[in-house]
Image (cartoon, coloured by chain):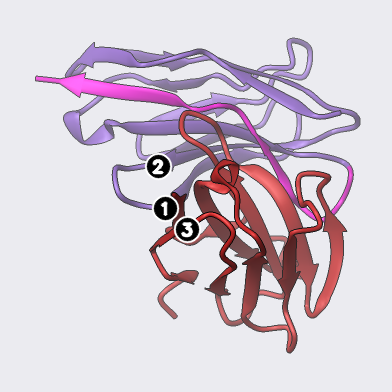
Chain colours: A red, B purple
Amino acid sequence: DTGVSQDPRHKITKRGQNVTFRCDPISEHNRLYWYRQTLGQGPEFLTYFQNEAQLEKSRLLSDRFSAERPKGSFSTLEIQRTEQGDSAMYLCASSSYEANTEAFFGQGTRLTVV
Amino acid sequence: GDSVTQMEGPVTLSEEAFLTINCTYTATGYPSLFWYVQYPGEGLQLLLKATKADDKGSNKGFEATYRKETTSFHLEKGSVQVSDSAVYFCALNGAGGGNKLTFGTGTQLKVEL
């Protein structure tokens, strides 16, 4: 297992377009998290899943954002009608609830909305 | 709600200098505390952690002690190397469940020869 992987690494989109990011967690991890990091700031929590259930969503996650984890494995984060303020690094992390492990992070997807 | 405050950077040191990066937190209950490091072009990596008061986390020569009385978790290293240049994030895992993390804003460390 090579860790948490995210795709794509970079995405440039025009304002108003929809974008979708994918995250593949470490295979035995049942918890998956999405964070957003803007320049000069620390990551901010967006949402998390335990298996396929989305258990918490931050108020940062507006109605234009939706996340899924349909089979409890990979997850997708979709942003509809992108705005320039959505430009950020989107980070995915995973952990194991049973093993109480710390979160392992992917390298992130950098979104630029022009 | 939970929050983490870190000293602002960048911090610039000469190789072999002593490093301290201050971190204080506000949280309900008894959070776990973490230091993550982000090297240029890479993702966040866990550097060390402490799960209860007076615990000391250590890794790669870095140390931090969980001080409940001062709500602090300062990062220290006795002798930094150029390869330690990175951004360091202090974080906590609050009592709200789910193991979600609250991060500080990060401190950039630059180590020069």
Q: Provide the residue designation for mark 1.
A: B43
Chain assignment, label 2? B
Q: Provide the residue designation for mark 3.
A: A14
Residue at 63 percent across and 74 percent down: it is: A76
Chain assignment, label 1? B
Query: Which callout, 3 or 2, points to the residue nearer the camera?
Result: 3
Residue at 55 percent across and 26 percent down: it is: B105
Q: Is residue B70 left or right of residue A56?
A: left
Name the residue furthest left.
B113
Q: Is residue B17 visible?
A: no
Q: Is residue A58 above or below residue A21?
A: above
Q: Is residue A69 left or right of residue B14?
A: right
Name the residue furthest bottom.
A71
Question: Identity of the amino acid at label 3?
Answer: Lys
Point out residue B72 in the picture as x, y percentages from the top left corner.
Answer: 67, 17
Q: Is residue A30 left or right of residue A87?
A: right
Point out residue B98 in the picture as x, y percentages from the top left corner.
Answer: 82, 56
Question: Identity of the amino acid at label 1?
Answer: Gly
Magenta range is B96-113
Chain assignment, label 3? A
Q: Quadrant of residue A63?
A: bottom right
Quadrant position of the N terminus of chain B in the picture: top right
Q: Provide the residue designation for mark 2.
A: B38
Q: Is residue B44 above or below residue A97?
A: above
Q: Is residue B54 visible?
A: yes
- Mark 1, Cα crowd under 10 Å, few <14 / some 14-19 / many 20+, is some
Asked if residue B103 lies in the magenta stretch, the reply is yes
